[in-house]
Image (tube, grey):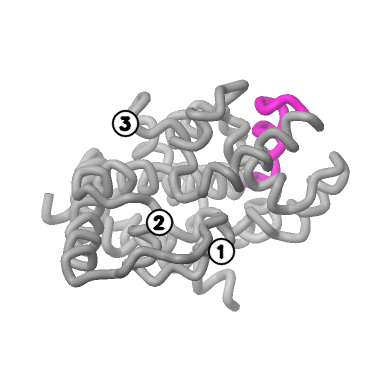
Amino acid sequence: MDTARATASAVKKTVQAGGAFFFAPTTIARGAELGLDGVTLYVAGRGGVLGDVGDDAVVAAFHHFAPGTLIPLWAAGAKVSPPARTGALYAECARAWGREHLADLPDVERLAHVTTRIIRANDLGALAPLYSAWRAVPLSDDAPAVLAQNLQTLREHRGGLHVLALAAHRIRPLEAQLAEGSPYVGFYGHEKPFPQVTADLTARREAAEKLTDELVAAAYAVLAEDESADFAALAPTVGAHLAS
């Protein structure tokens, strides 16, 4: 587990950036073709892989959103296109982003292989619905597209495990965002007055983050030593590559 912990720590920022395509110009343009603005496409596309599910399932899957903000966005997307269709389009947006931005990334094939290994070996079922739905999306044959889709899937993997860790520490969605100083509280539709961030809440939030790290590391333990070493060494180059 020590190797897995080190790997999870080394790749954490790269995995958390797996949604880089969410509001990329090419993604926004695809949404506009359907008549969807960027935020509505984000909800309808990211969640569309769940299929035609009920409101409660959508709220549970997205977790951070206030239901009164999330459900109208989901409904607006469903009026324009069936959820599964929008989800498939959104996955293609991820792949297109990968082809545009990661095609000349050194060792992109190796990263695509290693990330696929992790995803295929870790089935969380109903415990992490968005991860499980993205995990079921077919992969293409080209490594840049595979890597982009896998990073989004691993982002949902970490997110799903984090939701479990927050629940284990009795932390509600808004409390979690406030305790971590999230800049997206308004985006998620939460309104003042906000609950106070106490020392106890901060401590529980930090404990939940550590638990998330540990759960992610357990998933990465499926890698062989050379795969772990490559993932730890190569994943940070994604961010450096995009910044160059």
**Mark 1 lies on residue:** 186
Q: Is residue 90 magenta?
A: yes
Find residue 157 and report its horizontal and vertical position in percent: 38, 42
The residue sitting at 28% across, 41% down in the picture is 164
Amino acid at pointer 3 = Ala
Q: Are marks 1 and 2 in contact (CB under 8 Å)?
A: no
Disc 3 residue crowd, few under 14, some 14–19, many 20+, Cα 10 Å:
few
Amino acid at pointer 1 = Gly
Q: Relative to residue 111, is residue 144 drawn left or right?
A: right
The residue sitting at 56% across, 22% down in the picture is 53
Sequence order check, earlier mark of 3 and 1: 3
Quadrant of the drawing holding the C terminus:
bottom right
Foreground pick, 216 / 41:
41
The answer to whether residue 224 is seen in the rendering is no
Sequence order check, earlier mark of 1 and 2: 2
The magenta stretch spans which residues? 81-95
Find residue 66 and report its horizontal and vertical position in percent: 51, 48
Q: What separation in Å lies between label 1 and label 2 (alpha carbons)? A: 10 Å
Above or below, 79 against 46 in this view is above
Q: What separation in Å lies between label 2 and label 3 (alpha carbons)? A: 32 Å
The residue sitting at 19% across, 59% down in the picture is 204
Sequence order check, earlier mark of 2 and 3: 3
Find residue 93 and report its horizontal and vertical position in percent: 69, 45
The answer to whether residue 159 is seen in the rendering is yes
**Mark drawn on residue 174:** 2
Point out the frontmost of discs 2 and 3.
2
Q: Secondary structure at mark 2?
A: helix
**Mark drawn on residue 199:** none
